[in-house]
Amino acid sequence: MTILAIDLGTTNSACAVWRDNDVVFIPNKLGEFLTPSVVGIDDKGEILVGQGAKERLITHPNMTVAVFKRLMGTSHKVAIHKTSFTAVELSSLVIKSLKEDAEAFLNSTIDEAVISVPAYFNDNQRYATKKAGELAGLRVGRLINEPTAAAMAYGLHEKKEGIFVIVDLGGGTLDVTVLEFFEGVMQVHASAGDNYLGGEDFVEAMVDAALKAHGLKRADMTPEETHQLSMKMETAKRRISGPEQLVSYTVAGTSYSSKIDTEWFNRTATPLLIRIQKPVESAVRDAGLSLTEIDEVVLVGGATRLSVVRSAVGRIFKKLPACTIDPDFAIVKGGAVQAGLVQKSAALDDLVLTDVCPFTLGVDAVDEVNGQFVEVFSPIIERNTTVPVSRVSRYYTVQDNQTEIVTRVFQGEHRKPSKNVYLGSLRSSVPRNKAHQEAIDVRFSYDMNGILDVDVTVVSTGRTYNKVIKNSPASLSDDEFNKSLERLQKLKFHPRESERNRALMARGERLFETALGEERSAIAALISGFEAVLNRQNAMEISKAQEEFEQALEQFDLEEWH
């Protein structure tokens, strides 16, 4: 049995297998080990995948599409010529191309795969990735987090012990994972990330800066001109460590040029580099560690080739990061190691892997504040809990003679359910009774693939309702999707006239999202109480509440990052 390891990247994809106790990288039909994640339709109406499609990005932008990984888990469709595709369908075409390359190279049929996903992918995005593999004719037995895969490659390569941080900055996503190697065990302690930060964003920033210098905007350009400038900036980015470059381009038929050097690039990239720090802080904090306790920092992902990225990470940790494995292939190499584990390779008997749940999973619940019911997010499995895991929480009816409880499942860190990712719902019948007299136990079981199993047990009758949550907006019926869209469009927020109130609320929300456990519950209660005061619109009461709320938040915000 051969299991194909696939690194499905935003910019490039790759595949490998575990064979003869080692990783074997698979070349594509052009003999390259990286396949651009680009799909197009040629003049004959035939599908193009990889380099052939990439070459047509400039000349045929309306017939070619890239960077669609960022649309995974959504119902958004991309038009290519006269045909519309979902991100799942486009990804399946890339996976199918990799599968065909592997079968040709190995001269055998492959029907199972391990696919890597960003650690910060939510349930919808993971399910969409799994479906893309299935559409390509593969059974996806395992999804593995990208930085975890990179760590496996690194651990097998270096065989060191200690506490490590993997900073994975690829074409479209940033993942930060804190893990520990000891006695053949790789234990992931925490993960954080940014699904909208990667090498593509550095190119976009360069394009915007060049246009701004000439008083131009993207709206002034044709699709062909936009793609052309982006491709030139991508090339300039790759050569940024060399001498000054002159990039020439056309906007609305007029020629322009921009001088690109290291100083210009560093200045342009600064806002993006700053964004790297927050996930690093979050992951290390959630792991219960300080920066001084990290033994080594490992960089993977193509964008970490940039010297400014390596310098930024080095400044955060105050030590030089390690780059001993080619950053373009670390993830797929680790995926192949995982495939070897699934194949029960004797060479990997001494390697054990644990992983974590990257987002908090919970349900919407009702909290009573000053006689009014307020919808709140109730966490059941908090982020960075080691998986597989099973947790249970109890909830009670809120009305007399209530006969049904709807349990809506969400994933995220916001205290308002509507601001998190909706995953699905279950309906359970309860006997008529007084409020608070009937209860349900909600059990979440979360596995290594990011698939959530929900059991709702009515305490008084013992009846259990079950649902496996593996839903994606792309898999919803038209009716369900339209209802969801209509609900989101109707969401309104109470206006806040005072800037101080807005600042305090924002601070409270930030602290809630970074806190865990009892601390998170305490902050949620503070926010709910302050909101209740604001809603009463009593100026004197609000003034007093501002002082009390600020002082209370200060206690949670005293610890500075070191």
Image (tube, rainbow, N blue to C red):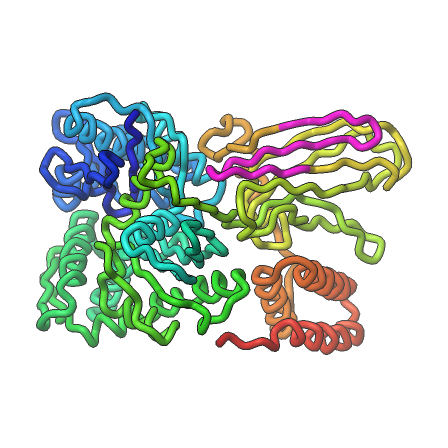
Name the residue at 36% across, 46% down.
70
User: Total number of numbered labels?
Assistant: 0
Quarter of the image for residue 112 reads top left
Farthest residue to the right: give it.
434
Q: Position of residue 368 (x, y in %)?
A: 80, 52
Farthest residue to the top: give it.
109
Residue 188 vs residue 398, the one in the foreground:
188
Left or right of 219, for residue 447:
right
Name the residue at 63% across, 38% down.
444
Q: Position of residue 561 (x, y in %)?
A: 51, 74
Q: Position of residue 549 (x, y in %)?
A: 71, 72
Q: Is residue 465 magenta?
A: yes
Residue 352 vs residue 262, the one in the foreground:
352
Left or right of 221, for residue 496:
right
Name the residue at 37% across, 37% down.
341
Report the quarter where the N terminus lies: top left
Q: Is residue 303 magenta?
A: no
Name the residue at 28% across, 72% down.
311
Q: Position of residue 373 (x, y in %)?
A: 78, 49
Above or below — where is 287 with respect to 314?
A: above
Task: Mark yes or no: residue 86 visible.
Answer: no
Task: Please state the extent of the stretch shown in magenta in the rendering.
Answer: 443-466
Above or below — where is 327 with respect to 27?
A: below
Task: Mark yes or no: residue 299 visible.
Answer: yes
